[in-house]
Amino acid sequence: MSFIPGIGLVRGMGLTLRRFFQPKATIRWPEEKADVAPKFRGRLQLLYDEFGTLKCETCFQCAQACPIECIDMGGMDTKGRFHVHWGPPETYGERREESALRRSGRPVADPAYARFETLDPAAVDEILEAHDYDPRDLLAILEETQAAYGYLPVAALKHISRVTGAWYATIYGAATSYRHLRFEPPAIASAAPAGEGQREQEAGYRSALDAALGYGSERPG
Amino acid sequence: MTTPSRAWGNLTLTGKVVIPLLFLVLVVGPILTILVATVVGPWLMDVLNSNLGIVRFVVAIGGVLLFSIPAAFIIIYMELKVIAFMNLRIGPDRVGPKGALHSLVAGLKVLTKEDFTPTGADPIVFTWAPVLVFLTSVMVLLVVPFGPGLVGQDLNVGLLYLFAVGGMSVVGLLLAGWSSFNKYSLLGGLRAAAQVVSYEIPLTLSVVGLILLAGTMSLNQIAEAQAGWFTDWFVFRQPLGALIFFIAAIAEANRTPFDMAEADSEIVAGFATEYSGMRFGFLFFAEYVNVFIISALLTTFFFGAWNAPIDINAVLEAFGLAPIAVALDPASLGIGLPILIVVVPVVLTLVFAAPFYLARSSTPAWQALLLGFMLFNVVAIGTLFLLAYIGWPWLAGLVWFFLKSFAFVYVFVWMRGTFPRVRIDQLMGFAWKWLLPASLLNLFVTAAAIIIVKS
């Protein structure tokens, strides 16, 4: 096929002709707006100024605001001359330590979440004990935690993170990707979690899958 | 202060514009009309009649010159839009409906830009090179038959003239490149010279077989020789010639993938590097006029020129029908004509509005009337166009000629959107090692076939 002279030309022309009739990707801003998720904040990137130095002021505001702690601040001073910081220096020092701790991958106590730390973790501890503190059972742990508290308190998630060693970001991510897990108490106490009917269906699928794979009632850990 | 000047001072700005205009129309206009009709007109007609050849030439070149500008605008817009579509963009869309006036505004922008002559450039040559380039393009258009009888000058050496004048454009490019006092420009000019001179040979040889077949070098007669069904087009008798002409014509017009002369990624813009303002506009215009020219020539030589692909009269005859002929003489209706002009639109509007009004009781009368009026307009314009198409062969020819030509313009734009630029040595090697032998083969085979058929 490929040694017919001119076949490449014809195929190229065919490609462009197909493109000609395809729907166009252009968004005619400002008449049309792109359909983005409300929590979309653009691409996170550190910018450099015209002298090649980082524009970041090490204010840690982004790190503090980040809901899943994915922003990790590092470095003492980005200008290399003196510390540029808004706020009292002792806070800066704390934040620096905090940042270093965060970079280490361990969970860090964050004063920004202090108002959530009013939780009796006994129920969570019980659940975790039952699961042998194994973060691979994360979904089951989260479901049981929700059953115990009615929702998933942030303090409980942080406690799970601290005790099992799993990253908070991982736990938060897992919890947000399931529709039946929620982070706030339901407005109506008796309301069923979202997708409740679906859960039964999924349980049906799971038991069918277990049967097909030859597992009994006990599932391998 | 005299009265007229005081009256003038009392006028508003609008009045100062409108009053002189009214004066021109009401006083100067009639006087001029009477003067032209009685004294100047007959004298002028005498002069024009006694110099009919010159008048015809001036009108033809004026028409071609005027035609080349909108044609170039349309092709520029088409190129922007088509390549954008192939890139999954939508292209220009701000000026005019769907951006249709974009190239017009771009042309105005070019007019208002500074026209700069660099230090060290040869000012006379630098100024006149774009004129030469543009002029050759327009002069080539002079012999192109746009329709039956619609040809600027029906030269009996039309083909020869075509290649002689078309080859002159490279002189303009070389002058532009040399006079710019810039190494990129010079390189571009030299590339243009080498390329155009090389491709001129297969280009000319590819149509020699066609001259043998048609027995003439007049473009008009070549067009007439292809009348009838589309199987009579020369592309079916000279397929190799058509292919060679297609390739060589692209190279002649410096189009992608053979745009070595102005390869903007290699030598900035070639011969056009130092040009700005309307002088650059001329070079740019000439390029797009050239695109139209090669499309028009391809149509004229190989794709039936202005002939329709289907011989409608032959089809009618096969079904036992008389050929359609329209001989409308509106003047024969006498006083009936103005009455008809008043009555027919109203009646037809009502007739077309009736079904909309009757079909749904919720349709208001004014909406139904509006719809009926629009429908009447569509039908009337369609009927008029159909009558004109049947009654005027030159209009039918013009429609087919432009349809075919712009189909080829689309192909050239399509190729520009697809192919990368070829390397210069491959370009030259292709011309000398492949196109030239192929065109010679085409010529010999055609000549042999004619001898065999005739003997």
Image (cartoon, rainbow, N blue to C red):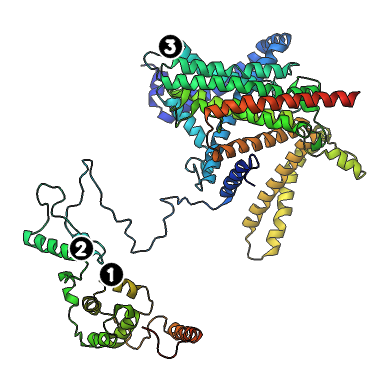
Q: Is residue B372 above or below residue A145?
A: above
Chain designation of label 2: A
Report the residue at 80% width, 39% height from top: B310
Q: Residue pushed farthest bottom?
A: A217
Q: Dot 1: what SS?
A: helix
Q: Which mark is residue A103?
A: 2
Q: Amino acid at mark 3?
A: Asp
Chain designation of label 1: A
Badges 1 and 3, same chain: no
Estimate how packed mark 3 is, as few (under 14), some (14 to 19) or many (20 or more) residues with alpha carbons within 10 Å: some
In this view, the residue in front, B33 or B373, is B373
Q: Dot 2: what SS?
A: helix
Q: Position of residue B138 (x, y in %)?
A: 61, 21
Q: Position of residue B5 (x, y in %)?
A: 40, 19
State the CA–CA distance, disc 3 to disc 2: 67 Å
Residue B448 left/right relative to B44: right
Q: Dot 3: what SS?
A: loop
Q: Position of residue B237 (x, y in %)?
A: 79, 32
Q: Which residue is mark 1?
A: A169
Counting labels gives 3
Estimate how packed mark 2 is, as few (under 14), some (14 to 19) or many (20 or more) residues with alpha carbons within 10 Å: some
Q: Which residue is mark 3?
A: B122
